[in-house]
Amino acid sequence: MTENQTFTDDPVVVTGLGATTPLGGDVPTFWSNLLAGKSGVRQLTEDWAAPLAVRIAARMAVDPTEVLPRVQARRLDRAEQAALVAAAEAWQDAGFKGTSEENGLDPSRVAAVIGTGIGGVTSLMDQHDIILARGPSRVSPLLIPMNMPNGPAAYVGLQIGARAGVHTPVSACASGAEAVALGLDLIQLDRADIVVVGGTESCIHPLTITGFAQMRAMSTRNDDPERASRPYDKGRDGFVLGEGAGVLVLERLSSAKARGRQPYAVLGGAAMTADSYDIVQPDPDGNGQARAARIAVERSGIAKSDVVHVNAHATSTPAGDMAEVNWIAKLFGEQTIVTGTKSMTGHLLGAAGAIESIATVLSIVHDIIPPTINLDDPEDGLTVDVPREARKATVTAALNDSFGFGGHNASLLFHKL
C-alpha cells in the first residue's frame, strides 16, 4: 500500500470459502441446506452417551477421514482434520493449487490465522485413557502436536506455505471471528498480502458435554434433537454442541483483480471488545457487544442504514439471545433482518464465527438470508425481523456477531463491492 492510499482505496476482499459442517462437507452443500432450513443435530448413539444428561450433538456431515489421505488423517486431531479440509476448499476456491510458492506468491507475504476454543481435547482424553489402561509406553508420540490449540493453524500454514505468520486466537466462541479480524489487521498493517482465516472445533466428548451440561448451558431435548436448538423461542433451554470448520481467503482488491478473481464481498471492518462483566454470563445490557458492532461499522465507512442483515450469535440460551437482540434493534432498527443459523448447525464454538461469516458473505452475494428454524413461540420483546424461511432481500451490508465466555465480543462487517 502506497503512502497516499487508504484502506477504502484498496479494500480487503474475500476470494475463497471453505467449510465442513453439520450441514455439509463443503460450502455449496452447507449453504443449500442452510437455506432449506435443515437441522444437523442428531442423537448420540455411542455407548458412552447413554448415561449423559445431554445425548445430542451436531457432528460433521462428512467425516474428514473420508476426505483426507488415510496416513495423514491418523496423525491429526479431528479439529486439525476439519481445518485442513476447509482450508483446502477455500484455497482452491480462491484460485490456488499447491503451496503459495507453487502459485508464484511470496511465502513471506502469506499468513494463516485459524482460531479454536478448545483445541485437540479429544486426542488428549483418548491418550489419557490409553495411559491409564495400557501404560506410558503406549501414548502416541504425536499427542502434543495433536493436542496443541495452534495445531490447526500450523498445519494449514504448512499446507499453503505461509511464512508471514501463523496465528491462533483462543477466545472461546469468539475465536473464529477474531481470526477473521486478525487477518484483516495483518493486511491493513501491510504485514501480509494474502491471509487464510477461520476457525475449527471438534470436542464432542463425554467430559466436554458433561462440563457444559453441569453449567446448565445445553439443551436437554434428547428425544427431539432436530428441534433442540431454538434461538428466540420461549421454549429454548440451551445450545447444542456442534463441530466443524470454516475458512476464508482474504486479500486486497488489487491483488484479486491482478489474478482475475471476482471477490465475494468486502470485509469492510472488524472490532473486538470485552465485557469485563462475568466469566460466562454476557452483560445483560449488551454494551460491549453493541460497541464492537458500532466500531466495525464505523471502520467500514458504510452507513449504518445500509446494514440490512445481522447473522446473530444467537446460541439458544435464555440469557444471551435477547441481550443481543435488544441492542441490534437500538443500533440498526427493528426492521433489521436477523437470523440465528445455530438453530440448524448447533454451536461450533471456536468455529462458529467462521462458518457464520461464510453464511453472511453468501447472503450478500445471493441477496438471500437463511431462516431461523424452531421458532414456534417467539420470546416477548423480539422486536427485530426474524424470518422462519429463507428471505430474499437486497443485502448491501451485513454484520456477523460472535461472543465468547470470558466476555469476548467480535463483530465483522461485510458489504458488497
Image (cartoon, helix red, strand yellow):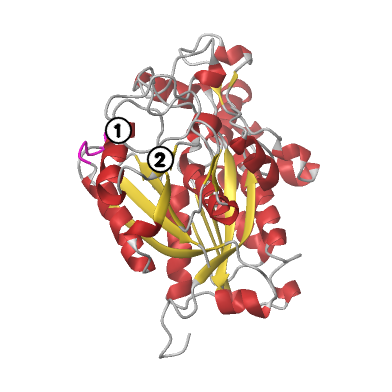
Q: Position of residue 23 (x, y in %)?
A: 63, 34
User: Residue 223: within the magenta?
Assistant: no
Residue with the most extreme bottom position: 3
Residue 223 is tagged as: none
Q: At 77% from the left edge and 38% from the top edge, which residue is drawn?
A: 66
- What is the tally of numbered marks visible in this picture? 2
- Point out residue 163 in the picture as x, y percentages from the top left corner: 58, 71
In front: 397, or 404? 397
Q: Mark 1 points at which residue?
A: 322
The amino acid sitting under disc 1 is: Met
Q: CA separation, marks 1 and 2?
A: 11 Å
The earlier-in-sequence mark between 1 and 2 is: 2
Residue range (magenta): 279-285
The residue that disc 2 covers is: 313
Task: Please identify the dominant SS of the magenta region.
Answer: loop
Q: Is mark 1 on a helix, strand or loop?
A: helix
Callout 2 secondary element:
loop
Q: Can residue 149 be seen in this view?
A: no
